[in-house]
Amino acid sequence: MPGADKKLIMNEKAEVFFSDHEEKIEEDFENPYFRPEIDRGALRKILLESLQPTTVVWNSHFISMEKENEGWLLHFKNSPSVYADIVIACDGANSKIRPYITDIKPFYSGITMLEGNIYDAEKKAPNIHKLLSGGKIMAFGNNKDILMGQKANREIGFYASFKADERWATNNGLNYNDKTEMLNWFRTSYPEWSHIWDELFENTTVPFIPRPIYCMPLDQHWKALSNLTMLGDAAHVMPPFAGEGVNMAMLDALELSDCLTSEKYTNLLEAISAYETTMRKRASVIAKESLDNGELMHSENALENMLSLFSNHSTLDKT
Ligand SMILES: Cc1cc2nc3c(=O)[nH]c(=O)nc-3n(C[C@H](O)[C@H](O)[C@H](O)COP(=O)(O)OP(=O)(O)OC[C@H]3O[C@@H](n4cnc5c(N)ncnc54)[C@H](O)[C@@H]3O)c2cc1C
C-alpha cells in the first residue's frame, strides 16, 4: 500500500507535531527504517497463492495430539485425526500446541488496545478520513493514545490504547456492540481529547474488540525436540509497538525451512535446535524494543518521546 506508511504525530487536540506527508520517502528495502505497509488480507492472499491448492486443509480445528511412533497423532474438532512426522505450531498467541513444547506462558504488558474498524470511511468518517490522508495517525495525550491507519477497501482501522488492569476487557461492563455506550466511555476516559476523535467511535462497525497485550518472557528457553517446533506468535507473542510481529513470523518460517533443508545438520533435532536458538535470540531483541516502545508511547511524555524517536528514524530522501 504505497503511501500508507506516511504518518502524522498529533496531540489530543489533533494538532500536528510531525508530518512526512509532503516529503519524498525513499523506497529502500535495505534501510531498517523504511516501513512499507501491506494489508493483512493482501499478504494472506499472496502467501496462499504461492502454495499448491491442496496444501492448506481448511476447517481443521486442532484439539490435542499424542505421541505415535517417531511423530504425532493430531486430533481435530471437526475432521479425522492425522499422523505427522513433524509438527510446526503456527497457531498464534493462544497456541494449543505450544504447551507440548514448554510450560512458559506470556505475561500481560499492562496495556490494552480497544480496536475499531470503519468501512467506507470516506463517507462515514469524512473528517478523520481527510486527516488520515491514506497514511497513519499516532495521537498522544495524558498517558493515552489513539493509533490508526488506512487499510485496503477504503477501511480505517484504529485503536484506543491505554494502560489498564489485565481484566479490564471483561470487567468493565461495557457493551462492545453499543456505539453510544462506547462513545460515552471514550468521552469519560479520554476527557481532554478533542471531539474530532468522536467520529471514530460513532462510525465503527461494531463490535469493538478489546485486545489485552501480552508478551513472552524475553529469556525464555526450552529443550528442542526432534519432531515439534513453533514459529510466529505461538513462539514469541509481543506487543505490536514496534510493528514487527508479522515480519518476525515470516522470518521464522524462512529460517526454519532453511534449517530443515540444509545439509549442514545431520538430523532434525540439530536443525530444529539451531533454528530455535537463533529465533529466540532475534525475537527477544525485538520484543524488548516493543515493550520499551509501549512504555514510551503510554507515558506522560509520550508525544515528546515519539517526536524524538521519529526524528532519529528518518527515511526521507534528502538528496
Ligand atoms: C492490536 C494488534 C495490532 C498489531 N499490529 C501489527 C502490525 O501493525 N504489524 C505487524 O507486523 N504485526 C502486528 N501485530 C502482530 C501480528 O498480528 C502477529 O504478530 C501475527 O499475526 C503473528 O502471526 P502468526 O501467524 O504467528 O499468528 P496468527 O496471525 O495469530 O495466526 C494464527 C492462525 O492459527 C489459527 N489457529 C489458532 N488456533 C487454532 C487451532 N486450535 N486449530 C487450528 N488453527 C488455529 C488461527 O485461526 C490463525 O489463522 C498486531 C497485533 C495486535 C494484537
Image: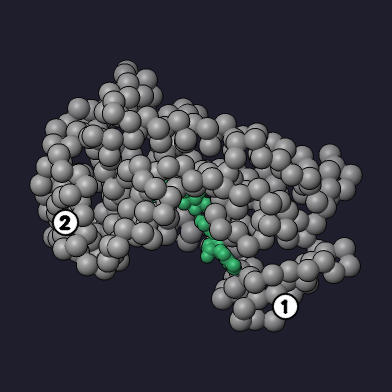
Residue 202 seen in the figure: yes
Q: Residue at x 77, y 39 (%)?
A: 274
- Which numbered disc, 1 or 2, marks the residue closer to the eye? 2
Q: Quadrant of the C terminus?
A: top left
Amino acid type at circle 1 is: Ser
Q: Position of residue 299 (x, y in %)?
A: 33, 31
Residue 81, numbered circle: 1
Q: Residue at x 28, y 48 (%)?
A: 160
Q: Is mark 1 within 8 Å of ligand 1?
A: no
Q: Tags 1 and 2 in contact by the CB under 8 Å rule?
A: no
Q: Residue at x 11, y 42 (%)?
A: 194
Q: Would you name the residue on which mark 2 appears? A: 184
User: For residue 221, which quarter of the picture?
Assistant: top right
Q: Residues within 10 Å of mark 2 (few under 14, many from 20)?
A: few
Name above or below for residue 199 compared with residue 288. below
Residue 37 seen in the figure: no
Viewer-proximal residue among 174 and 202: 174
Callout 1: SS: loop
Name above or below for residue 295 compared with residue 268. above
Viewer-proximal residue among 185 and 21: 185
Q: Residue at x 70, y 75 (%)?
A: 75
